[in-house]
Amino acid sequence: MAKYEKKLDDDIRCPLEYGLAIFGGKWKSRIISVLSAAEKLRYSELRREMCNITDTVLAATLKDLIEVGIVERKSYDEIPPRVEYMLTQKGKSVVPILQNICQWSGVFYKDDVENEMLQCQRCDHNR
């Protein structure tokens, strides 16, 4: 079995680099936005909301977000077992940043109504 490698580079010297490593990229920001809109979701619900993500990528990305304290995983001792994912306070603090990025992007991104992404509606960029 391969040893799990830490995802964050020990040589990060810039706060922007740290932030982008924590919540940047295609999947991390989408997961944060979806969890923000729903408060808590089971894995299958999250997978359905994410649409085009593979199980491998979703599981790995959730693991990364849990490791850095953005997402919390809560297991319930029930039959069948139930696991829910939700944003931590640290994760909730990222949401306004993502909303600001969405607002900025909306100003400069060419409008394309036919190809609008479903996840885009979740970040409340019009607030």
Image (cartoon, rainbow, N blue to C red):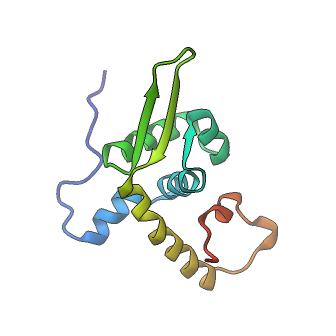
Toward the viewer: 74 or 25? 74
Q: Position of residue 53 (x, y in %)?
A: 60, 43
Taking 40 as reference, is 116 above or below it?
below
The tally of labels here is 0
Image quadrant assignment for residue 33: bottom right
- Asked whether, in this view, residue 34 is left or right of residue 91, the answer is right
Taking 59 as reference, is 117 above or below it?
below
Toward the viewer: 59 or 127? 127
- Asked whether, in this view, residue 10 is left or right of residue 89, the answer is left
Rendered-image quadrant of the C terminus: bottom right
Farthest-out residue, bottom: 107
What residue appears at the point 63 percent right and 47 percent down from the top-left corner? 50
Q: Position of residue 51 (x, y in %)?
A: 67, 46
Taking 119 as reference, is 5 above or below it?
above
Q: Position of residue 15 (x, y in %)?
A: 26, 70
Farthest-out residue, right: 114
What residue appears at the point 47 percent right and 53 percent down from the top-left corner? 28
Toward the viewer: 41 or 107? 41
Rendered-image quadrant of the N terminus: top left
- Asked whether, in this view, residue 110 is left or right of residue 56, the answer is right
Q: Position of residue 101 (x, y in %)?
A: 51, 74
What residue appears at the point 60 percent right and 84 percent down from the top-left corner? 108
What residue appears at the point 31 percent right and 49 percent down from the top-left corner? 68
